[in-house]
Image: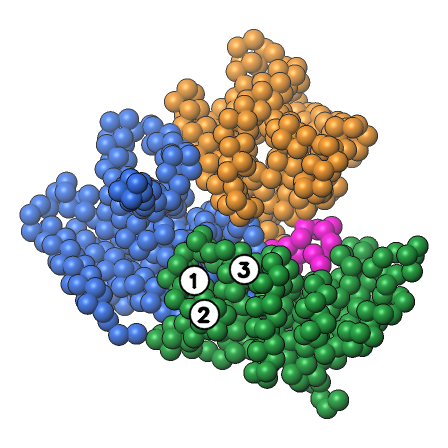
Chain colours: A blue, B green, C orange
Amino acid sequence: MSLTATDIRNLCLASLVFAICALLPLGDQGYWLGLGVTIAMFTALATSWALFSGPTHYISLATAAFFGVGTYVTGLGIDTLPFWSLVGLAGVIGAVLAALVGLATLRLSGVYFVIFTLGLAELVRQVITWVQNNSGQKGLYVLTDLDEAGIYWWLLGLSAAVFLTGWLIGRSRLGFALRIIGDDETVAAHSGINTARAKVLLFMVPGAVAAMTGAILAPRYVYIEPSLAFAPILSFQVVIMALLGGASRLWGPVLGVIPFTFLLEAVSSNFPNQTTLVIGVAFLVIVYLLPGGFVGLMGRINRHLNTREGA
Amino acid sequence: MSTPVLSLRGVTKRFGGLVAVNAMDFDVAEREVVGLLGPNGSGKSTTLNLISGALPLTSGHVSLWGSRISGLPAQTITRKGVSRTFQLVRLLPSMNVRENVVAGAVFGHRRRWGQDAWDHADQLLDKVGLGGKGDMALGQLTYIDTKRVELARTLASDPKVLLLDEWLAGLNPTELQIGITLIKSLRDEGRTIILVEHVMDAIRSLCDRCVVMASGTKIAEGTPTQVLSDKEVIRAYLGDDDA
Amino acid sequence: MDILITGILLGGTYALIAMGLNLQYGVARIMNLANGEILVAGGYFAFIAYTATQLSPILTIFLVAPLAFALNWLIYRLMLQPLVNRAKNRGQLETDSILATFGLSFIGVGLMLSFFGGDYFSYSFMAFPVELLGNTYGANRVLSFVMAVLICGALYLWLNRSRAGLSIRAIATAPASARLVGIDVKHLSALAFALGGAVTAVGGALISTYLTLDASTGVVFTLKALIIVIMGGVGDVRGTIVAALLLGILETLVASLLDPGLTLAAAYVMFLGILLFRPQGLFGKKPT
């Protein structure tokens, strides 16, 4: 389909926003840049997560697994291959892994998928730990000349790519198929849609993005070990941020990423033991107070205003 | 009859111990309208579900133009040109009327995308009597209009075989006449139609042939007049005492 | 042989925990992901009762059970019932209850962390060896197994013989029809959920006599219980028991022959096999 005037305006606007964000390291190299890295990382993760979970309603907790695999790709390959190729390689491995997980579980009900993805990070972590113990190696050093600003730009670029992908999928037949699947899977199948294939294809997107994010962030950790790379809490943070913002719109998750990053930052520096409690409360807030996230809330307010005007 | 468009041979469906459909055999010729009749719970809708691929068969087979389609997933059967409506209307709640119709056009037997699909959807909406309502939300539609949207979606992929599951049920007499005329026009376009129906007026005026089911088994087959005067059919509907 | 018996002893407690989850999922249709935290809380209770007052865990369970029952009943009535009421379809309830019970799970961990800290806890109860078929095992393990068998047996009898048990099985099989024959589905769902929670907490108290727990181990038990329930088939008591024993044996096998760090990985591989080849559970009929 050709671009309409609105499309072109939105594209320009989005490019402008990204350009402004890209200027951050010029202003600050310390605390704010650190936050910027976190926000850029979660924007890529949560937006790609919502691309899959928004239309399909499957809750994936596999982020940590793909992320960890990505960090290990960088960790193992950094001495032999250039950094950019490792990011690409991580993306391919993440996508293939996601396809395998999807083929095994996406035919079944949502509960099976949640449980399987929840354990996936733990499975990979245990296997890597075991391999390391048996080979006598504890962790990996990742030494590059990539600084914080470099990581930030990489992540920002990845986020931009995620948005572009999401926008293109939204305009494609695949995107349309997913909307139908999200509404009624039986109708989707009877309209000629190969529902399993569409879901697996789409699940490869967050798989690839999470692995690439891990690969990009590996130099920041310097020393990689399984319990750090496969921290399960990452998966939950991504779910909360995406749902808090709203998974039904491409720009929804960002609305959750920014406030929740600040909230977690504040909590972990003031009450370091209460982060789990905050995550728990956030889940309940999403279910009981904000179904549909901020996007849903804005929709309700809009409708309310419209009916008031109409009356 | 030359090669039938659709033929069922020994089609059987068990749910646990219950035999819902028992060794059904029948053929449907090109451009024929076949009515599938029977009391409630006799297995008509299940038979339709077996043809469309919504349910897997326990045994037997269904063929389309002589090649086997049973065992294929629903989406493949749809792509081969068999399209259906549902007993309880199923529309896509997050989409407007036009998008609901486009949904049927993009992935089915004959595929369209982009402006072509939108134009095609608008033509179909005109045809089913919903011209100009493409931008409406589903919530604004009356009951018959939701049925029209579903029919338009079903037609959007230009299917060769249409399966209509009680599409005329619940319509008032005026709407019924409109509905009957609409289905007739579909046959005149060259489509082959199987309809599960209770409305006798519709059966008499639409069907070339009827297959009557009771307790999962075929008990009669013939023209509407023949089957409706058949002793066994009357007994199945009214019970022994009245026969 | 040694491995087999250790595995069966472990599997017995797993069966109890999984029975708790199965009651909750099979009847109340809530996949309770906070199940593991209830278990750890039961363990904490037994730990505190034993270290503070020397109260035997075998007696503690008679305190733990009613407390956990009440707590789970409240959780169901206050938090989950509204989700059941508002859900438009099964899928929505599934998503909502997964998110809500994840929330509860994190809150449970958070609360336990702030009350008890993040340390492992364990105590020495009946830590003397007993001999079985030529090998020695911890008396606490054997006792836990015996208790688990007794409780599973009682539950099985209750489900199969009593009127309430019959109604509960009816709901598990066909919720809509159960309502039609005059079964109070809401009331019994809450009851089943609470009972499931009580069974799990008792399992926690028993397991704490021989395993070291800490505030955040709950999720591991949740995962194992989920795997057992899916493997055994939802609502299938016999399947749950067989699956639990299989898992216990597999874990013991992997831990003693390969590496104790791989037990969950092994459980996962088994789960994957089930998903690929028998998604309807070990004894489940193929859906038609």
Disc 2 designates what residue?
B125
Quadrant housing the C terminus of chain A: top left
Q: Are marks 2 and 1 in contact (CB under 8 Å)?
A: yes
Q: Amino acid at mark 1?
A: Val
- Whether discs 3 and 1 lie on one chain: the answer is yes
List x then y, in percent, for residue C66: 62, 18
Q: From the viewer's perspective, tell me whether residue B115 is left or right of residue C259.
A: left
The residue located at (33%, 50%) in the rendering is A46
Subunit bearing disc 2? B
Subunit bearing disc 1? B
Q: Secondary structure at mark 3?
A: helix
Q: Residues within 10 Å of mark 3 (few under 14, many from 20)?
A: some
Of marks 3 and 1, which one's residue comes earlier in the chain?
Answer: 1
List x then y, in percent, for residue B133: 40, 63
Disc 1 designates what residue?
B97
List x then y, in percent, for residue B4: 71, 85
Q: Residues within 10 Å of mark 2 (few under 14, many from 20)?
A: many
The residue located at (78%, 63%) in the rendering is B38
Q: Amino acid at mark 2?
A: Leu
